[in-house]
Image: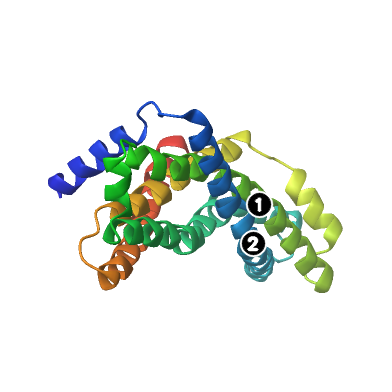
Amino acid sequence: MFHSLGKYILLLRLSFRKPEKFSVYWAEIMREMVSVGIGSLGIVAIISLFIGAVATIQTAFQLISDFIPKTVVGGITRDSTILEFSPTISALVLAGRVGSAMASQIGTMRVTEQIDALEIMGVNAPGYLISPKIISGVTMIPLLVIVSVGLGLTGGYIACWASNDVSTTDYMRGLTDGFNPVIATVCAVKAISFGFVITSICSYQGFYVNGGSLEVGQSATRGVVWSCIMILFCDLIISRLLL
């Protein structure tokens, strides 16, 4: 475990060395941002709408009574969406969609000796391959989480409009009453941390592949599994420290 942790830290150190030519790195960063952000927008949007609707329906089912104001449903849906559903579930989905692609891409370059060719030409392979992915992850995944929050709350509004349990007026009043800015800060910290975890772990798994195509698939699987585990671990630590 400590050997793998040391290799991971050293790889990150190599990844953020001064680039040989900034324009080449910038083009790679832009390409990765498009791949991570625009490429993942559809799946994040669909999941967020349904999760927001389901969260609202289940909250209304459990809490609606003559002694509880109906505006509580909007407040609980808002807090749970911002704190947990949007950052964590989006990150778990992106670990499968983005992380596996990164691990497979770098792993394929390793087994086909493209990384060796880059190093022979004097290119810092970790910096060229990994740092753009990490930068795109910590930049675009928080933006995707913001979109997820908005669509999750919109899904809750649609669920209220389609059912008779809670009126849309009560739902909107619940969204605006008693908002605590701390939950937005926690959401931002989680999103940035999850973006770093996904991209760095999956890149590490792909960079140190040994073997052939079978090992590339196994490295992608390990990258997704370890990313999901570390996402949940970081979720616990951040919630404990900031709430």
Report x, y in % for residue 146. 65, 47
Q: Residue at x 27, y 61 (%)?
A: 111
- The answer to which quarter of the image holds residue 167 is bottom right
Q: Looking at the picture, tell me which residue is in the foreground, 79 or 102.
A: 102
Q: Looking at the picture, tell me which residue is in the foreground, 45 or 159.
A: 45
Report x, y in % for residue 94. 50, 59
Q: Residue placed farthest to the right in the image?
A: 169
Residue 130 appears in the rendering: no
Instruction: Please give left or right for residue 3 compared with residue 51 in the image.
Output: left
Instruction: Please give left or right for residue 100 compared with residue 144 in the image.
Output: left
- The answer to which quarter of the image holds residue 54 is bottom right
Q: Which disc is residue 232 wearing? A: none
Instruction: Please give left or right for residue 21 compared with residue 177 in the image.
Output: left
Residue that mark 2 sits on:
48
Q: Please report contact status of discs 2 and 1: CB closer than 8 Å, yes or no.
A: yes
Report x, y in % for residue 191. 52, 45
Q: Residue at x 82, y 73 (%)?
A: 162
Going from N to C along the chain, the mark reached first, 2 or 1, is: 2
Q: How many marks?
A: 2
Residue that mark 1 sits on:
149
Q: Looking at the picture, tell me which residue is in the foreground, 175 or 200.
A: 200
Up the image or down, 98 lies above or below 62; here it is: above
- Which SS class for mark 1? helix
- Which SS class for mark 2? helix
Q: Residue placed farthest to the front in the image?
A: 121
Up the image or down, 133 lies above or below 86; here it is: above
